[in-house]
Image (cartoon, helix red, strand yellow):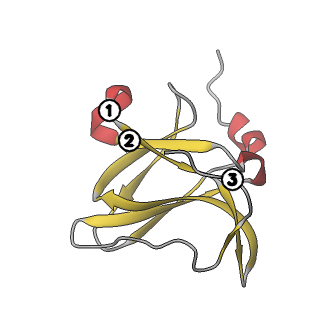
């Protein structure tokens, strides 16, 4: 399924499916990631695990403009957020019935944490 990237998402345009063992994830992102798909996978599964993805979109709310990828129906567990096919950006725990949050740092901030080669 391909998501159309036309206009920004407005407040109330995303419906979350929360339940006993189902949570949601909101990944806050810098503006330069607008239009990029960010993948997540169960942490225990590693790089070979099945990945889910969501598109970073401009979100317009009463608080202003932000950029985020929203994962609406996520089974409870620990997840890796992938920067690319081989590099994790971090991990997050999703709890059933709750919304988890993860903040993707701007590339300029992430570079200072890179391991020297």
Of the numbered discs 2 and 1, the one sitting upstream in the chain is: 2
| Pointer 3 residue | 5
Q: Nearer the viewer, residue 59 or 1?
A: 1
The residue at 73%/53% (across/down) is 30
Q: Describe the element under mark 3 as helix, strand or loop.
A: loop
Q: Describe the element under mark 1 as helix, strand or loop.
A: loop
The answer to whether residue 50 shows anywhere in this view is yes
- Name the outermost residue toward the bottom: 62
Which of discs 3 and 1 lies nearer the camera? The answer is 3
The residue at 57%/80% (across/down) is 12
Tell me if label 2 and label 1 are in contact, CB under 8 Å: yes
Picture quarter containing residue 24? bottom left
The residue at 67%/57% (across/down) is 57
Question: Could you classify mark 1 by the number of other residues whose Cα lies within 10 Å: few (under 14), some (14-19), or many (20 or more)?
Answer: few
| Pointer 1 residue | 49
Q: Nearer the viewer, residue 72 or 107?
A: 72
The answer to whether residue 112 shows anywhere in this view is no
Q: CA distance from mark 2 to mark 1?
A: 6 Å
Where residue 111 appears, as percent x and y from the top left, is 72, 34
Q: CA distance from mark 3 to mark 1?
A: 27 Å
Where residue 2 appears, as percent x and y from the top left, is 55, 45
Q: CA distance from mark 2 to mark 3?
A: 23 Å
User: Please, is residue 111 above or below residue 116 in the view?
Assistant: below
| Pointer 2 residue | 41
Q: Is residue 10 left or right of residue 86?
A: right
């Amino acid at each position: 399924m391909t998501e159309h990237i036309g206009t920004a998402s407005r407040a109330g345009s995303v419906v979350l499916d929360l339940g006993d063992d189902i949570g949601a994830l909101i990944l806050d992102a810098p503006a330069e990631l607008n239009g990029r798909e960010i993948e997540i996978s169960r942490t225990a599964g590693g790089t070979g695990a099945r990945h889910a993805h969501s598109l970073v979109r401009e979100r317009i709310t009463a608080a202003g403009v932000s950029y985020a990828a929203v994962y609406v129906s996520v089974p409870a567990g620990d997840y890796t957020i992938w920067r690319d096919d081989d590099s994790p950006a971090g991990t997050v725990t999703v709890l059933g019935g709750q919304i988890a949050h993860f903040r993707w740092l701007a590339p300029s901030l992430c570079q200072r944490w890179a391991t020297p080669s």
